[in-house]
């Protein structure tokens, strides 16, 4: 019955036959053609059916019909010519291109006469060569050939029918052929294909010879059996032997032996056997080659036997039964059976041998041992020796053992030895034990080993182990085996262990055999038995029993196959060590016999499985190659689960790169990376390649991370590679770090560090790559720049910190981007990275939770620049910190977890900073434990809130208090016991001072007049919310935050104010909470997520949108809001929204707002108030200002927040001292803090107001002071204090362009210059004694609220930061009143030191009571025009400046402040009060004109009177000085002084001097010199005039007397002066002459 596969095969063959119809090949098949010469499809089909008759359908059905036909036709082509008695063989790999058909394998084609053993022999040879066999096709054809072997015809046979068995049934020229088609593994090498062909031809020749001579060999055996009785035999030969030999020969000939070869040999005197020519049959048909010195060739195999084995040829026994040394090439690939029949001469000596080679047939192996000649005798002898009757129980068992005994062994084993073995086996019976029976081949060619072992222990693994042991013990080179398994509990394995030919086998003693057996017992031991024994040995009986119950069934078979029981006990012990605190263990080990690079690594884990995808990267990053992995799951009896993961590792470099502690270092490094203590990156490879510990690798990783943040252009991967390529240098760098920073290394002194530096330099000189040299030197630089580190500290538990902090000297790192801070702390851990930049010892600034992981230092550096400007009004200089949390969960999935991780990272960051910061205890500096310091004492570390950390101050203070840090909760301002910035609204109020000033200058009072606003933020925010409540006249037209867009096109100020206040007081409000009923017509609240937003006419009009625009995307609408034509843009949000047109969005670095950012020139507001940070780029601000906009910078506007924090910190420092001394409780302290809130706010806002005043004054003089500002900028650059490009300050070329267009520095630029002035001045003054001057205590006290001044004045005087506070207040007062270039100009003009100038200016301000004037001007806000206020302040400033210069030139330096002020102040005031009466002529006219102008502008009479006298008040210093020298009353001197000025027209001359140009420094200095000379001359002449007359003389009388006395000289002087006064122009030349003329008056008097 045909199956579907059979039907598919038949159909396929039909399709293949049709292929032949269209192929020229088809007509060549000798199977018939049509009348037209075309192939007959039916006959072709018949040929194919015969060819594939016995081929399995599944081997064909997936083939193309073309390939089916092609294979058959190819075979036919091979058969076209075959001479008689030969075989055709072809081995090829057919392809369509070459053959027209193809096969996925290589094809072996054989055509030969049909005979037995063909297919077996061919496939055996291919298998021997390792050629995989895929398909075998073996058709038999009846063919006709001519005498030359040419194929005439392939005779047809019935489809599926048998071939004719009788030759008489065939034509005379026909015979049967075997065509063999074998497909093997694909091979394309022609040499290999040719070798296969050669080998198969040799095999086929052996088959032919064996088959052709089979009858002759069989006849030889029977003839020899008949002839044996007549041959001579030795006298001592037992008679039965000859008969036994005859029986054996006849038994063999009776189809019990496959005869393959026969030959006769002669025994020579040297015990060698020589072949007798012409006697060979079968595979021995060919005679061996003759050597030149021999008559007959020697048997090569016999010749290779040892001498003692060859001597056996002369033994007196007829039969030789053994195995040959070679395998059969015919039929089966077994070793040939060797049957030798000796030949004796008449004397009974052995003279030769008749040798039969072949294979016992299957019948020989199945026939009963009692019917096999030779064997049956041995069986009877064994039974007799054993004393058993064949019918007894033991006799039957023994006989059964013999029946199943290896038949070859029965032939070859002597009876006595056989009896010993089988008797032992009998006694063994069902006992579960292993026994070895070892026998040597009598010719020394192999060992025969019988192994009995319990059947359940017999596995492939056991067998392989037994083979290995036998080969090792017996010196074997190959092992053949057979196995016998029955229902018995024992299995029997028979091994034949062959040794190298010619080897003399040693006699094995019983001890040797026992030793080998013992090894086999161990190899075959049950794993469970071994496990139990090993447990007992390791843990003792009781504990072992407990563990065995738990783990007996836990280990998988895979584990057992890979690990011995002792190894399992070791693994179990590691698992037992695990618990809740330690859930994994590790073991790196070297397997027995492992290569130099080979190691294995185990991970032990209880509970959850380990993810291999997580493990493998860790191992790879450690620099090892994972070559295999074997996970084992252990399911214990108590239902617990444990895991053992065993990894095969290849370690590059092998043992040479592994130190003695490599195992511990590797395990520790893996554990660190696995648990997250170390990051998984290329630095871990240094543990093996450079011999580092994982923590030493952390040091290098921390430095690399810092270098990346610092702007290194080299990637981390490149750095890792460089360190691995230069391991010697890498080790030196680590050693240098430890030598400098480890407390344990400090005893070695600097000699060790110097030696290492020299060695590092030498190593760097050997680095070939320039890039690698730069990388290594950058590591060296930062290591040398490291001042402190907590790396060697221990945490509370005694273990090292899981983070590293390093303090750097940035000035020692030349590649850092500018500006470089004074100090920098870098914090690194796998969990958090952070940086803290400080620009001075006393510095403060916020800590930001940054989301810019790749460049957060760049972000912080940008922020600290603004912080420096903000901090000019406070005690500390600028500082800023930032951190990134690197392991944050998804906030969308679990925001609480996200926040918790952020807080944990913040705590780590704070701890890292405090770890390396000095503390103060009882006024003494206490250094951190285990921290080597390369810098001075550094105790001042304070922080503040920033983006992301607004509510973290209590957390920071909690950490500080855990360190017992001296600042306590003053460490971080704004906590629960500090000032609530949002509650105070202080940041917004500070920025609002700027807004009010800008509008005041525009003539608008924001507190009484409505104005329009657009903004960034919402009412829930601190800065935006508070800001939009600072005036009830705000008309907020539009605003947006990250959620909504708010538009109120025509708001009612009062209504919208009330609604904004409601939202501000509503917790977590948003614009969506705004009552839309209160919006003006057309208004609305729109989500930013909307696809588009519709626009109505009201919105278009309010925002200045073109009439045709009906809708906008949210992004476009927000851009429109930013550029709306309103009065104020108020920024209370986060982000950068305005840039310069020359900047790209990429330059800004705020990708989140790229879509809505606008250019400064496009803003249409009049004023920008920057309550938020970084709302505009500096270039954007400048561009807006150059286009007429009014603004400062964010640092100026929102400095009130940091100012408040600074007051809080310094107040807490004072009060915490009281608390520590027991003079105040914490509760009382907190109450007092709260009570001072309002006054602290007022103190802070004074600074905001003062800085705005300073900027307003500067802008009023912007064009006139450009040259002085330019010189100051150059000075700062020259001193390395300023980078103009970095701060976006104009270049010299830009300044020239500004001058040409009538412009000077803008407000934002002035703000930066103001900050740099204060920063540099403060730094310098702190180094002087000025802050300690008792006179300045008033400034120190003025910093603190009234309650502290009144209750704790002594505490203020001893405040730890009293010098810094004093300096800060002094610098702010000095620069705010004097201007940005004032101090620099004074230095240029006078050459005085900064301290001297500031002392003089401080005294001048006090002498002239300038603070009274400035306070009076401030009171006129929104009462008089802002420009009037500015003119008054500038006039006051000029007075102070002149007074300063006078004090520097005329008083001993440095000034004693208190003494100087005391000496001048009252006397100057006495004269000033009488100025209206004292002034004459032009001076009086000027006084009156100024008074009238101010009075007309609305300035109160008292202030107008005082300001009108500014110009005339300066000489009062000379007047007081002259009065002091002459002993006159200051008023008397003043009368003469002012009278003389009028009479000599000195005032007019002074006006001409003032009009001189100040285009450069030298013109300014020349003008100042002439002016000072004129004042000096005026004073000297006044003294001369006072010297004449008496006490009752009037000024006129005195002058007349003096005039008469100097008439001639005075006349000439008047003539010259009149001529100069009459000049059309005044310059330095004629005014110099005027001064010389004045001096002649003095000389004449002298």
Image (spheres, helix red, strand yellow):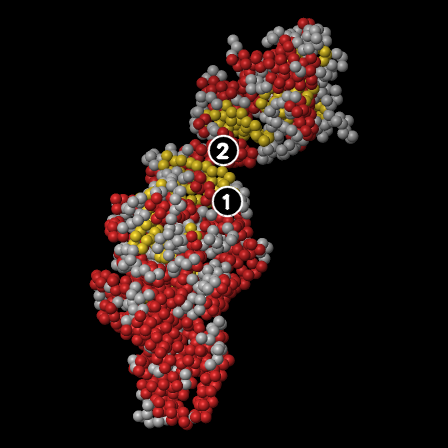
Quadrant for the C terminus, please: bottom left
**516 up-or-down from 389: above or below:** below
Q: Which residue is denoted by mark 1 in the rendering? A: 624
Label at residue 1027: none
**1245 up-or-down from 644: above or below:** below
Would residue 516 be found to the left or right of residue 1199 on screen? Answer: right
| Quarter holding residue 1546 | bottom left
Q: Which residue is denoted by mark 2 in the rendering? A: 520
120 or 1595, nearer to the observer: 1595
1166 or 1452, nearer to the observer: 1166
866 or 187, nearer to the observer: 866
**12 up-or-down from 938: above or below:** above
User: Which residue: 50% across, 66% down?
Assistant: 751
Gap in Å between the C-alphas at discs 1 and 2? Answer: 36 Å
User: Which residue: 42% across, 36% down?
Assistant: 632
The answer to whether any part of residue 1058 appears in the image is yes
């Amino acid at each position: 019955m045909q199956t579907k596969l059979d039907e598919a095969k038949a159909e396929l063959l039909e399709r293949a036959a049709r292929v032949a119809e269209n192929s020229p090949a088809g007509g060549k098949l000798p199977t018939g053609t049509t009348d037209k010469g075309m192939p007959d499809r039916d006959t072709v089909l018949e040929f194919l059916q015969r060819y594939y008759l016995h081929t399995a359908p599944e081997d064909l059905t997936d083939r193309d019909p073309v390939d089916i036909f092609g294979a058959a036709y190819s075979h036919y082509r091979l058969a076209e010519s075959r001479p008689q008695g030969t075989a055709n063989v072809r081995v090829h790999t057919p392809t369509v291109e070459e053959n027209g058909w193809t096969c996925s394998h290589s094809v072996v084609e054989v055509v030969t006469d049909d005979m037995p053993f063909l297919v077996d022999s061919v496939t055996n040879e291919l298998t021997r060569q390792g050629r995989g066999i895929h398909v075998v096709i073996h058709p038999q054809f009846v063919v006709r050939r001519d005498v030359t072997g040419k194929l005439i015809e392939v005779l047809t046979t019935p489809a599926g029918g048998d071939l004719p068995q009788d030759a008489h049934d065939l034509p005379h020229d026909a015979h049967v052929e075997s065509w063999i088609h074998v497909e093997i593994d694909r091979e394309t090498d022609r040499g290999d294909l040719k070798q296969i062909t050669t080998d198969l031809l040799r095999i086929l020749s052996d088959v032919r010879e064996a088959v052709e001579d089979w009858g002759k060999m069989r006849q030889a055996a029977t003839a020899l059996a008949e002839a044996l009785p007549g041959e001579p035999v030795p006298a001592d030969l037992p008679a039965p032997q000859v008969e036994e030999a005859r029986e054996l020969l006849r038994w063999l000939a009776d189809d019990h032996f496959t005869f393959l070869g026969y030959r006769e040999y002669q025994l020579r005197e040297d015990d060698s056997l020589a072949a007798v020519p012409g006697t060979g049959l079968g595979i021995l048909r060919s005679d061996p080659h003759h050597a030149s010195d021999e008559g007959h060739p020697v048997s090569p195999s016999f010749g290779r036997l040892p001498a003692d084995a060859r001597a056996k040829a002369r033994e007196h026994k007829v039969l030789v039964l053994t195995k040959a040394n070679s395998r059969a090439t015919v039929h089966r690939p077994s070793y040939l059976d060797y049957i030798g029949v000796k030949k004796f001469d008449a004397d009974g000596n052995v003279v030769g041998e008749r040798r039969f080679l072949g294979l016992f047939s299957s019948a020989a192996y199945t026939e009963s041992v009692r019917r096999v000649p030779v064997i049956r005798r041995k069986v009877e002898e064994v039974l007799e020796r054993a004393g058993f009757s064949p019918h007894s129980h033991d006799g039957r068992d023994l006989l059964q053992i013999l029946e199943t005994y290896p038949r070859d062994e029965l032939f070859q084993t002597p009876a006595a030895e056989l009896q010993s073995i089988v008797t032992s086996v009998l006694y063994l019976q069902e006992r579960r034990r292993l026994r070895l029976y070892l026998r040597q081949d009598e010719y020394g060619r192999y060992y025969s080993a019988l192994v009995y072992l319990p059947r359940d222990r017999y596995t492939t693994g056991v067998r392989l182990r037994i083979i290995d042991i036998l080969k090792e013990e017996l010196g074997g080179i190959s092992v053949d085996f057979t196995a016998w398994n029955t229902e018995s509990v024992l299995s029997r394995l028979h091994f034949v262990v062959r040794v190298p030919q010619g080897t003399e086998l040693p006699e094995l003693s019983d001890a040797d055999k026992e030793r080998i057996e013992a090894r086999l017992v161990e190899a075959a031991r049950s794993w469970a038995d071994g496990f139990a024994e090993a447990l007992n040995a390791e843990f003792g009986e009781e504990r072992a029993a407990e563990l065995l119950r738990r783990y007996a069934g836990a280990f998988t078979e895979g584990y057992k196959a890979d690990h011995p029981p002792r190894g399992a006990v070791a693994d179990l012990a590691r698992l037992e060590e695990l618990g809740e605190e330690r859930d994994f263990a590790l073991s790196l080990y070297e397997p027995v016999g492992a290569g130099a690079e080979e190691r294995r690594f185990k991970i032990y884990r209880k509970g959850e499985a380990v993810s291999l995808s997580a493990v493998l990267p860790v191992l790879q990053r450690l620099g090892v190659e994972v070559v295999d992995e074997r996970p084992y799951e252990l399911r214990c009896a108590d239902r617990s689960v444990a895991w053992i993961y065993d990894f095969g590792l290849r370690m590059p470099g092998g043992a040479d790169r592994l130190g003695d502690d490599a195992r511990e270092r590797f395990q520790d490094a893996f554990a660190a990376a696995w648990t997250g203590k170390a990051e998984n990156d290329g630095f871990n490879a240094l543990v093996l390649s450079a011999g580092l510990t994982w923590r030493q690798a952390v040091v290098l990783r921390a430095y690399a991370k810092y270098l990346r943040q610092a702007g290194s252009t080299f990637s981390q991967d490149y750095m890792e590679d460089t360190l691995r390529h230069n391991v010697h240098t890498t080790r030196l760098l680590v050693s240098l770090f430890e030598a400098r920073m480890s407390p344990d290394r400090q005893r070695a002194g600097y000699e060790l560090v110097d030696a290492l530096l020299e060695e590092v330099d030498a190593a760097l000189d050997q680095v070939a790559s320039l890039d690698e040299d730069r990388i290594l030197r950058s590591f060296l630089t930062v290591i040398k720049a490291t001042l402190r580190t907590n790396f060697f500290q221990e945490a509370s538990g005694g273990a090292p910190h899981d983070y590293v902090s390093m303090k750097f000297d940035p000035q020692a790192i030349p590649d850092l981007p500018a500006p470089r801070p004074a100090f920098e702390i870098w914090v690194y851990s796998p969990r958090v990275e952070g940086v803290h930049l400080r620009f001075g010892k006393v510095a403060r600034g916020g800590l930001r939770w940054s989301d810019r992981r790749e460049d957060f230092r760049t972000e912080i550096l940008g922020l600290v620049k603004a912080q420096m400007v903000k901090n000019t009004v406070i005690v500390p200089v600028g500082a800023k910190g930032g951190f990134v949390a690197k392991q944050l969960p998804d906030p969308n999935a679990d925001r609480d977890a996200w926040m918790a991780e952020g807080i944990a990272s913040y705590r780590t960051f704070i701890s890292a900073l405090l770890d390396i910061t000095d503390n103060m205890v009882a006024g003494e500096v206490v250094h951190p434990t285990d921290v080597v310091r390369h810098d001075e004492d550094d105790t001042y570390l304070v922080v503040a809130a920033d983006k992301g950390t607004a509510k973290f101050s209590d957390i920071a203070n909690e950490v500080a208090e855990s360190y017992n840090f001296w600042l306590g909760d003053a460490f971080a301002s704004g906590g629960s016991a500090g000032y609530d910035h949002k509650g105070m609204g202080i940041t917004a109020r500070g920025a609002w001072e700027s807004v009010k000033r800008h509008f005041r200058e525009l003539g608008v009072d924001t507190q009484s007049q409505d104005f329009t606003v657009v903004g960034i933020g919402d009412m829930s925010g601190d800065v935006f919310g508070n800001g939009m409540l600072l005036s009830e006249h705000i008309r907020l037209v539009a605003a947006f935050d990250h959620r909504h867009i708010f538009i109120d096109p025509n708001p009612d100020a009062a209504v919208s104010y009330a609604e904004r206040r409601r939202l501000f007081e509503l917790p977590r409000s948003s614009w969506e909470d705004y009552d839309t009923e209160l919006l003006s017509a057309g208004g609305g609240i729109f989500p930013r997520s909307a696809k588009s937003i519709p626009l109505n006419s009201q919105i278009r009009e309010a925002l200045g949108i073109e009439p045709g625009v009906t809708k906008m995307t949210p992004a476009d609408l927000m851009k429109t809001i930013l550029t709306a034509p309103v009065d104020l843009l108020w920024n209370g949000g986060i982000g950068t929204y305005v840039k310069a047109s020359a900047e790209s969005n990429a330059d800004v670095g705020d990708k989140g707002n790229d879509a809505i950012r606008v250019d400064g020139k496009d803003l249409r507001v009049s004023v920008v108030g920057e309550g938020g940070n970084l709302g505009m780029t500096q270039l954007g601000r400048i561009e807006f200002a150059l286009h007429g906009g009014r603004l400062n910078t964010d640092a100026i506007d929102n400095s009130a927040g940091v100012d408040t924090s600074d007051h809080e910190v310094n107040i807490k420092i004072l009060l915490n001292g009281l608390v520590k001394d027991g003079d105040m409780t914490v509760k009382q302290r907190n109450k007092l803090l709260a009570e001072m809130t309002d006054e602290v706010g007022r103190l802070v806002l004074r600074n905001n107001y003062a800085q705005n005043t300073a900027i307003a004054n500067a802008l009023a003089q912007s064009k006139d002071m450009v040259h002085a500002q330019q010189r100051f900028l150059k000075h700062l650059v020259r001193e390395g204090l300023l980078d103009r490009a970095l701060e976006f300050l104009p270049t010299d070329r830009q300044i020239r362009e500004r001058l040409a267009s009538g412009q000077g520095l803008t407000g934002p630029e002035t703000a930066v210059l103001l900050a740099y002035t204060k920063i540099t001045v403060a730094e310098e003054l702190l180094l002087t004694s000025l802050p300690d001057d008792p006179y300045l205590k008033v400034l120190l006290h003025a910093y603190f609220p009234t309650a502290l001044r009144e209750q704790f004045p002594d505490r203020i005087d001893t405040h730890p930061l009293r010098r810094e506070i004093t300096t800060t207040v002094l610098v702010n007062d000095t620069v705010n009143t004097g201007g940005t270039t004032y101090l620099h100009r004074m230095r240029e003009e006078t050459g005085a030191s900064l301290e001297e100038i500031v002392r003089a200016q401080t005294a001048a301000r006090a002498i002239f009571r300038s603070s009274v004037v400035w306070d009076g001007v401030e009171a006129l806000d929104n009462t008089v025009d802002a420009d009037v206020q500015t003119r008054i302040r500038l006039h006051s400033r000029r007075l102070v400046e002149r007074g300063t210069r006078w004090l520097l030139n005329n008083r001993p330096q440095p000034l004693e402040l208190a003494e100087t002020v005391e000496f001048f102040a009252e006397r100057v005031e006495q004269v000033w009060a009488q100025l209206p009466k004292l002034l004459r002529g032009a001076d009086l006219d000027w006084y009156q004109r100024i008074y009238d102008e101010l009075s007309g502008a609305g300035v109160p009479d008292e202030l107008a009177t005082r300001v009108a006298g500014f110009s005339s008040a300066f000489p009062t210093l000379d007047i007081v000085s002259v009065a002091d020298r002459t002993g006159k009353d200051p008023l008397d001197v003043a009368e003469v002084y002012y009278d003389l000025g009028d009479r000599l027209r000195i005032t007019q001359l002074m006006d001409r001097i003032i009009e001189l140009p100040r285009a450069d420094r030298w013109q300014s200095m020349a003008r100042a010199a002439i002016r000072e000379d004129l004042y000096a001359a005026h004073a000297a002449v006044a003294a001369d005039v006072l010297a004449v007359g008496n006490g009752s003389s009037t000024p006129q009388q005195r002058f007349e007397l003096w005039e008469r006395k100097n008439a001639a000289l005075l006349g000439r002087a008047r003539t010259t002066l009149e001529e100069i006064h009459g000049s059309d122009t005044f310059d330095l030349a004629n005014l110099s002459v005027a001064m010389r003329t004045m001096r002649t008056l003095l000389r004449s008097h002298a």
